[in-house]
Image: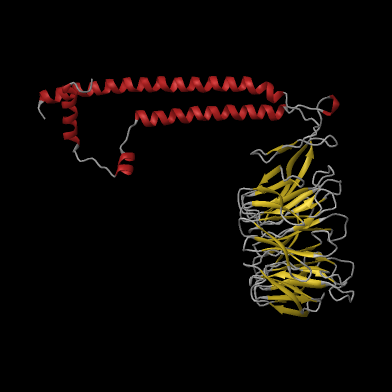
Amino acid sequence: MKIAETRTLTVAFKEIGKRHAETRKRNERETMRLSCTALVAFILILGIMTPMLGAMTIKDRNSQTATPTSSNMVQIQRTTENPQLTLAPKWNYTTSGMVWSSPAVADLDEDGKLEVVVGSYDDKVYCLNNAGALKWSYTTGGPIQSSPAIADLNEDGKKEVIVGSRDFNVYCLNSTGGSKWNYTTGGPVQSSPAIADLDEDDKLEVVVGSSDNKIYCLNSTGGLRWSYTTGGAVESSPAIGDVNGDNKLEVVVGSYDDKVYCLNSTGALKWTYATGGPILSSPAIADADCDGRQEVIAGSFDRNVYVLSWIGELKWKYRTGGWVWSSPVVADLIGDGQKEIVVGSADRKVYCLLGTSGSKWEYWTGDWVVSSPSVADVDGDGHKEVVVGSCDRNVYCLNATTGQFRWSYTTGDYVISSPVVADLYGDGKQEIVVGSLDNRVYCLGLISVSAGTQGGQGTTETDSTTMIIAIGLLLVAAVAVTTVVIMKRRRKPGISKAMKLLNWSPRVELEEGMRKKLEWFESGECK
């Protein structure tokens, strides 16, 4: 390269440097402007929200509202008869596998305190005390999706735990986790056992389904009483009740062959009803329409909830927008003597249906509702709530009368397990125990917030301060990110994005490119 040309290039690139310096100054001014704007916005928000948040009081109100927060702490406005309550996790226990199984709660060892028993996909049955500490575990040969049943099978004054496993076995464990017996079926046992004195001989029987297409009835020592073969896998859990009013118990269960089966106490078929899809939902037996006769209520993968008469005829059905895997619950939700049916669907909704037909209310969650609802007065205000899990990772509490949101708690994964509501501590307050596919068992409770001023009112100053700080941190983070983005985009321009999005690559060598840039400067087109 000639000396004159080199000098020209030097001058040209000094000009480039000067222009780049001017660009940097413009960028710095722009960054300062954005920072000042964010600071002013923060001051304005602070000024507006401080009096609003500072004035928040824990008041008694006639209306009921709830607002979920990202911190898993939810404040609930209560009726005038009750103080303000806050939802809080009391404990959680981590297993080594997903918890599909729904917990069972009972005083296993007769010490006056309740225990929680639940299965996990790590092949184990866990027994936890009411504080969430492990009392014992028992290892089976396969994942446990079945939910445990607890009863004094042999009437010795001590309770047993009965549960199925995907290793094809039904297990009976004593109150300390030792094995009493197991019965081997021909397939995985995902169905949950039902226990009753089927034949009125003053001895309990265990009824459970298996993926070998059979329903099994076992005696209290694990011997086979009878079995009945359906046309498909039986993952549905049996319901036992006097369906036809003859003072004898029947067994009702669903099958993958799309049918609902009703068997008598000796395992003989009484009737079947064919739906349009597999039935994993566990049926409910109840007088849903208050006509003095029992009905059988079950969900199907054909998206319908079926209400069948005591002789297996269709009374009515309700179509949801997705598979009905959830098991229905029948209860008088508002104390008016009429029954409602509550059930979930894979269309992401929880449905409340009138027992006589049709929808009363529905609530949309963020994903499939496979969990079966529980109905209880969770907060002690004299009114029932519906508690249910969703595959959006949340446990929901809804007003049973209207279906309005009360609160939710977020776990780490799908909640397929069905919640159990029980007073674990014997203090008159209900706890909610539920499993999640994040491998954990959760215990949730409602905690009273102490009043801070006269008249039972107290300000939520801590929550206000926390919220203000959080907003400030978000704004600071936004300014920092904006600054970094501007500096990266303006001070260090690159061609990688153009190459990626436009499938473009440079076709000019570096030296030729320098010459062309020099010509561009000399032409004056850059001014």
Q: Residue at x 79, y 36 (%)?
A: 78
> Which quarter of the image is occupied by the N terminus?
top left
> Which quarter of the image is occupied by the C terminus?
top left
**Is residue 421 visible in this depiction of the protein?**
yes
Quarter of image, res 198: bottom right
Quarter of image, res 219: bottom right
The answer to which of 515 and 66 lies nearer the viewer is 66
Residue 238: image location, x then y, percent: 74, 68
**Is residue 178 visible in this depiction of the protein?**
no
Quarter of image, res 512: top left
Above or below: residue 406 compared with residue 286:
above
The answer to which of 488 and 284 lies nearer the viewer is 284
Residue 82: image location, x then y, percent: 84, 37
In this picture, residue 523 sits left or right of residue 298: left
Above or below: residue 400 compared with residue 323:
above
Above or below: residue 238 compared with residue 411:
below
